[in-house]
Image (cartoon, rainbow, N blue to C red):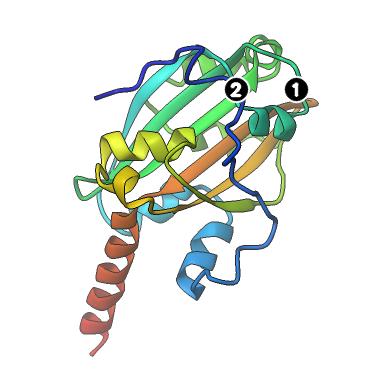
Amino acid sequence: MILPLTPKQFGAAPATSAHWSRLPMASATPEVRFWLQRPGALTAGLRELGQLELTVINQAVGWPSQAEQQALGLIGVRGARIREIQMAVGGQVCIVARSVLSLAAWRGSWRALRGLGHRPLADLLYDDPHVKRSHFESARLLHPERLAKLAGHLGAPDLARARQALWARRSVFWRQGQALLVTECFLPVFWEIVLQNARQRCTIAR
């Protein structure tokens, strides 16, 4: 079931809003830290794990959360262009991601996104010398957060009941002074895929 973009779902962030930090939490394992801070396109790393499939879930004008407004410097702005996707490796949905930018940026320096279609953002971000990326921030998301809620519908239906927190990272891309916020959330099955891939490499190396 796909969750549509509605004012109710895109209102102010709830009181349980995640705490974003430049440094991963102490509870993060070395493997988790690696992926939360991995430079370059996440899609490139996913392709190293298996066959990658990207699906656009939502793409419309919506209401950014308070945390997203703060990250973009758009406090009080109601409408923004929002794109939500899921990424599957080997047929397993393991990442949900969300990009947010102002309507002015959508019409301005980021207008090339209009023709992106079902391609990953990386197709535009990493070949453009005018695009600069901020540092990464990471957090653990619970079900009230939009991406955690989306993950529960798409790939991990037991997350809401179990109150399991999901690792996520975010960064801001800048082009000609206009910002694009990208948040990527790792489902539990992602870490299973990483572990399985590591075991296979060890077996081959023997």
Q: How many marks?
A: 2
The residue under label 1 is 74
Marks 1 and 2 sit apart, C-alpha to C-alpha, by 9 Å
Horizontal placement of 60 versus 19: left or right? left
Looking at the picture, does residue 110 appear above or below residue 138? above
Q: Position of residue 162 (x, y in %)?
A: 32, 52
Residue 2 vs 21, above or below: the answer is above
Q: Which residue is mark 2?
A: 64
* The one of 89 and 127 positioned closer to us in this rendering: 89
Instruction: Identify the residue at image location x=37%, y=34%.
Output: 150
Q: Residue at x 37, y 52 (%)?
A: 46
C-beta proximity under 8 Å, tags 1 and 2: yes
Give SS at disc 1: loop
**Left or right for 103, reference 81:** right
Q: Residue furthest bottom?
A: 206
Which image quarter holds the N terminus?
A: top left
Q: Is residue 94 visible?
A: no
Q: Residue at x 39, y 35 (%)?
A: 149
Choose between 6 and 175: the one closer to the eye: 6
Q: Position of residue 113 (x, y in %)?
A: 54, 20
Disc 2 residue type? Pro
Q: What mark, if any, has residue 156 been given in the picture? A: none
* Mark 2, other Cα within 10 Å: few <14 / some 14–19 / many ≥20: many
Describe the element under mark 2 as helix, strand or loop: loop
Q: Is residue 54 above or below residue 178?
A: below
Instruction: Specify the amino acid type for callout 1.
Output: Leu
- Residue 203, how many percent across, how many down? 21, 83
Mark before the other along the chain sequence, 1 or 2: 2
Q: Quadrant of the C terminus?
A: bottom left
Query: What residue is drawn where x is 57% and y is 16%?
Result: 63
Above or below, 152 relative to 138 = above
Q: Position of residue 53 (x, y in %)?
A: 28, 39
